[in-house]
Image: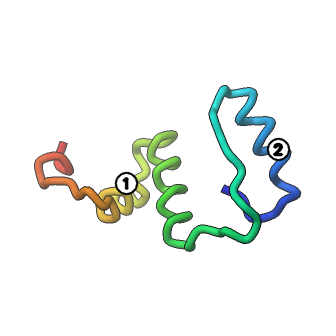
Amino acid sequence: MYRINAQSRAFEDQCMRQGIPYRLGRRGALLPPQEIKDAVCYLRVVFNPDDEVSLQRVITNRREGLGAKSVQH
């Protein structure tokens, strides 16, 4: 969720305050840019369900796939 170690403390503090479980990854093990973009789109949709662009990315990039009826709903 972050790429600079200087950001880790603020991230950890917020996770602890919100009761969100987290774990720190090993150094140098960065996710591919597409996976980061996908994760950010999921978060955008959670906090703003009207974000059509992010929702479309979530729908088209799901590995399980969604049926047309689910997408319409």
**Few, some or many residues within 10 Å of mark 1 (<14, 14–19, 20+):** some
Tell me what residue is drawn at x 47 percent, y 61 percent.
38
- Above or below, 16 against 24 in this view is above
Task: Name the side, left or right, on which 71 lies relative to 38.
Answer: left
- Tell me where residue 67 appears, x and y as whole percent: 14, 53
Q: Residue at the spot x=26%, y=56% of the render? A: 64
- Please, is residue 30 above or below residue 1 in the view? below
Q: Is residue 47 left or right of residue 22?
A: left
Q: Nearer the viewer, residue 26 or 70?
A: 26
In the picture, the disc for residue 5 is none
SS at badge 2: helix
Q: Nearer the viewer, residue 67 or 25?
A: 25
Distance from the alpha carbon under mark 1 to that under mark 2: 28 Å
Residue 31 position, x and y percent, is 59, 68
Q: What residue is disc 2 on?
A: 10
Quadrant assignment, res 23: top right
Q: Is residue 41 left or right of residue 33?
A: left
Q: Residue furthest right?
A: 6
- Three-letter code, disc 2: Ala
Q: Which residue is mark 1?
A: 55
Q: Residue at x 51, y 40 (%)?
A: 47
Which amino acid does the dot numbered 1 rest on?
A: Leu
Residue 17, image x, y percentages: 74, 27
Report the residue that reaches farthest toward the left.
69
Q: Answer with left or right where residue 6 lies relative to residue 22.
A: right
Q: Position of residue 7 (x, y in %)?
A: 82, 54
* Display colour scheme: rainbow
Residue name at image x 52 percent, y 47 percent: 43
